[in-house]
Amino acid sequence: MTRSRPHKLDFYRLAVQWPAAEAHFLLNTYAHYHSGAWPIWFKEDFAGTAALAAAWTQLDEDQRAIAVDAHGPTVRRAQRVYRDIDRLNIVHGDVLDVRAP
């Protein structure tokens, strides 16, 4: 039996990201500075792991996110990892060109 090795992006996420905490921080900070208004959409640029965008969609059933990255293999991996989240759109493209889902 062979064991698959963890992907380098898994190590990156574990080493430098805490997606659930970051998503809560962004939501609460926005609400603080916008009179309690809750944002629905979140766009994650340079979204190698798309973990933050995925965590954003888990905050509430109304939350939607788009994750954009220019590296094709990375985008395809994120699309496989998060294929079950229908409120997350992962796009292969230039972050300056992607404006809407």
Image (spheres, grey):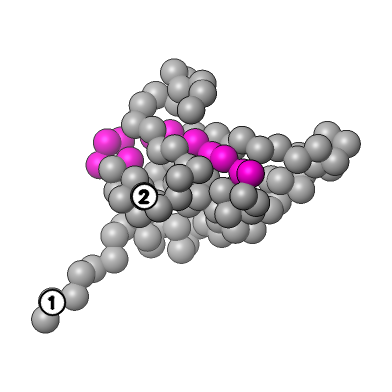
Magenta region, residue range: 62-75
Query: Image height check: is 41 above or below 95?
Result: below
Count neighbours of disc 1 (C-alpha within 10 A) and say few if under 14, some if 14 to 19, many if 20 or more. few
Picture quadrant where residue 11 is located: bottom left
Residue pictured at 45% horizontal, 45% vertical:
86
- Checking the image for residue 77, the label placed there is none
- Checking the image for residue 2, the label placed there is 1
Residue pictured at 85% horizontal, 41% vertical:
36
Q: What SS does tag 1 mark?
A: loop
Residue pictured at 43% horizontal, 34% vertical:
68
The percent position of residue 101, horizontal first and vertical second, equals 48, 28
Mark 2, residue position: 83
The percent position of residue 47, horizontal first and vertical second, equals 44, 41
Residue pictured at 35% horizontal, 54% vertical:
81
In the image shown, does 38 or 98 lie closer to the viewer?
38
The percent position of residue 29, horizontal first and vertical second, equals 77, 44
Residue farthest to the bottom, as pictured: 1
In the image shown, does 52 or 82 lie closer to the viewer?
82
Q: Is residue 24 highlighted in magenta?
A: no
Nearest to viewer (mark 2 / mark 1): 2
User: Hey, what amino acid is under mark 2?
Assistant: Arg
In the image shown, does 38 or 27 lie closer to the viewer?
38
Q: What SS does tag 2 mark?
A: loop
User: Hey, what amino acid is under mark 1?
Assistant: Thr
